Image (cartoon, coloured by chain):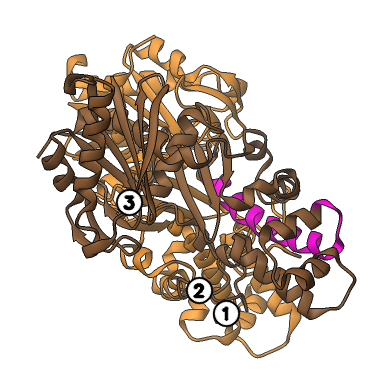
Chain colours: A brown, B orange
Amino acid sequence: MINIGVDLGGTTIKMALIDDEGKMIDKWAIVTNTIDNGKHIASEISSSILKKMQQFNLERSTVRGIGVGAPGFINMDTGFIYQAVNIGWKDYPFKDELESLIGLPVVLDNDANVAALGEMWLGAGLGAKNLICVTLGTGVGGGIICDGEILHGVSGMAGEIGHITVIPNDGAACNCGKTGCLETVSSATGIRRMALDALDYNDSVSILRDLFESKGDITAEDVFNCAAKKDPLSSTVAEKAAYYLGFALGALAVTINPEKIVIGGGVSHAGDTLIDPLTKYFKQFSLPRVFEACTIDIAKLGNDAGVIGAAWLCMQKVNQTTIS
Amino acid sequence: MINIGVDLGGTTIKMALIDDEGKMIDKWAIVTNTIDNGKHIASEISSSILKKMQQFNLERSTVRGIGVGAPGFINMDTGFIYQAVNIGWKDYPFKDELESLIGLPVVLDNDANVAALGEMWLGAGLGAKNLICVTLGTGVGGGIICDGEILHGVSGMAGEIGHITVIPNDGAACNCGKTGCLETVSSATGIRRMALDALDYNDSVSILRDLFESKGDITAEDVFNCAAKKDPLSSTVAEKAAYYLGFALGALAVTINPEKIVIGGGVSHAGDTLIDPLTKYFKQFSLPRVFEACTIDIAKLGNDAGVIGAAWLCMQKVNQTTIS
């Protein structure tokens, strides 16, 4: 059977046709049309998919359905979207809408969760049924899989690991309203902030400072690049980001006992410059039996994680749903 | 159908007959016979149950099977016990042994997990499918239920929340070999230690000090009793225990998004003297949506949690297993 995966983002909607063995038959993308609070999105997805099915001569009977990873706050059972700020939706029955337009079953989950499913199926988490996925980007996102199932929690808030407090006192302010969240120190934004603070705080010679003076700004990537070149100031900042991430993941690991931790997002491109200190601190803050059972890897699927995970969701869940 | 619940402890083995509606038909206990590295235990459980079935005229066809909560390190799938120090077992196929003796299907899980299942079924967690159970006793134990299923993790270590690091630097030594674990500050042992340190550190007037001087020692219970009477030194210690527990549970809650947190064990008898500050800190370290969806309650089943949870395990899992 063919599974259709849809990764619904604020700027583009990625889509793919993927068979039950995980073979990607085609992938494509359309622009996210946020005009009129996103009311045209469902019909644009529907026509794009129908056109693609025609192009590949796919009979309806060979298509299992559509899995969607969507941003915002979602009721996973009903596919009702309470709010998706980037898109403009509020109290929108997206699943029902798309199903009635396209006549195929639709299943929905949170975009961070769906990316985790993708890495579990075909990426760095290959085959692991107990998996923690962390995305280190502008913020810190998470998807947690236990016994092959995504954790949602009682109100769909599970996996918000960016908001684990890692600095209980005098931490930096977080977008969530708290202070000292993991996101304030281990996201790209947090790493940049810590580096700017460090540059401001002392006047040591540093290739990061040279970069800052020539470009007028720095990024988390610059920090890790300079740390890889043994720049002391950059290394201190990179170490700090890894320390707090290791602290939070240690706490999670003694709770979840995962087989894999998969690190994705822009910051993960730092590779060993991040993974080496992270592994050291993760060992310090977990238990020996937990540490030994777990490997930490960089995400492998990049931008395809979403559509692949959405296709997996479709494959696993569509038989449990019916078109309403 | 009748489910037999067995709670296997180092000193007694509690057993109960419980029907599918959760009605306890009878409960009883036998002494744990640790002679010869516990090799007589399986046959003593078997004969005790067979005698009880005779006493109640229970036909084999009306008994679904036997659920067991056991201490130590267990393979939940095979019912093989790698090690149970208190009992003397090492590499012991307990499930196979008991099944061949009694001729009924047996399912096994960790004792802390089984107690959590008991509270979920008939206790403080009544009906909650997303539940964190914490036992504050000599140590700090945990059982985590997500979507109605106990988390085991890849090597059976999930739920070891007593070993979440809450004091990253200069924390007290823990039995696990690390320092600053939750268990070092929020267990009965940890609370007593902190109170003795506080008595030693200053010479303020305190009813806890009076108690210490008259008895020659104090317990965690004394600390909470004196805190309830507004003794400043005791209140500071109780507040500290609640602070670290709130910190750890906040991190877990943004990860798991539980509907209930159930606090059991001796320290939970402190009631509101513990729950009030704990709730305050839990709110501080979780997210508003997570906090609002969750209530914190004292465990209700006391010593019966184990047999009730074991009976539930039997009811849920026996149909999935066969006698080997």
Q: Name the residue under label 2.
A: B224
Which residue is at the front of the view, A13 or B260? A13
Residue B298: x and y, percent? 36, 61
- Using residue B33 as the reference point, say whether residue B181 is left or right of it: right
Please state the chain letter of the residue tagged with numbered disc 3 in the rendered image. Answer: B
Q: Which quarter of the picture shows residue B235?
A: bottom right
Residue at left 76%, top 54%?
A225
Please state the chain letter of the residue tagged with numbered disc 1 in the rendered image. Answer: B
At label 3, which amino acid type do we have? Answer: Leu
- Using residue A259 as the reference point, say whether residue B205 is left or right of it: right
Residue at left 47%, top 37%?
A304
Magenta residues, as a range?
Answer: A228-255
Label number found at residue B301? 3
Which residue is at the front of the view, B120 or B282? B282
Q: Mark 1 points at which residue?
A: B234
Please state the chain letter of the residue tagged with numbered disc 2 in the rendered image. Answer: B
